[in-house]
Image (tube, grey):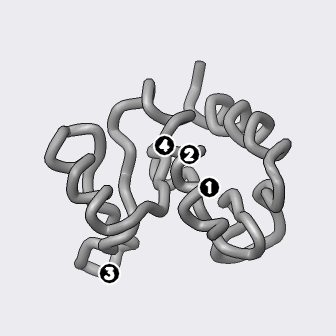
Amino acid sequence: MDLEQRFSDLVDELCSRPGVVPPGGNGFGSHALKVDGSIFAMLVRGHLVVKLPRDRVAELVAAGTGGPFDANKGRAMKEWLTVLDESTWDALAVEAWEYVRH
């Protein structure tokens, strides 16, 4: 399955959760899942990127599950993880949704 389809399936799964809005529109965030207006997961350069607490991101990077996310500005964004292990997409997307909606 290609990554676009995999992300589309993830979107379909998460849109049943309270406050989740699917990707849409134009510009920044148009390819992102949002909860209550805030981005929690997006597909960027062929990788799922999720928003998690800074300590959790560091833990996942150390474990090799993900890497730092750089929005092409030359520095890592501390609360964002580029997910490298596709088998963790669902769990990490749900974790990001739970984190951002609070």
| 3 or 4: mark nearer the eye | 4
Q: Return the mark for residue 92.
A: 4
Q: Tell which circle, 1 or 3, labels the residue nearer the N-terminal end.
A: 3
Amino acid carrying mark 2 in the image: Ala
Q: Tell which circle, 4 or 1, labels the residue nearer the N-terminal end.
A: 4
Residue at (38, 66) in percent of width and height: 53
Q: Are marks 2 and 1 in contact (CB under 8 Å)?
A: yes
Residue at image mark 3:
73
Position of residue 14 in the picture relative to residue 74 (left or right): right
Amino acid carrying mark 1 in the image: Trp
Amino acid carrying mark 4 in the image: Leu
Q: Give the class, few, some or many, for how many residues have Cα within 10 Å of label 1's Cα (few <14, many ≥20).
A: many
- CA gap, disc 3 to disc 4? 24 Å
Q: Tell which circle, 3 or 4, labels the residue nearer the N-terminal end.
A: 3
- CA gap, disc 2 to disc 1? 6 Å
Residue 93 appears in view: yes
Q: Are marks 4 and 2 in contact (CB under 8 Å)?
A: yes
Q: Tell which circle, 3 or 2, labels the residue nearer the N-terminal end.
A: 3
**Residue 4, x across and y down, in percent:** 63, 37
Residue at image mark 2:
93
Q: Are marks 3 and 2 in contact (CB under 8 Å)?
A: no
- CA gap, disc 1 to disc 3? 25 Å
Residue at (67, 73) in percent of width and height: 38
Viewer-nearest residue: 45 or 84: 84
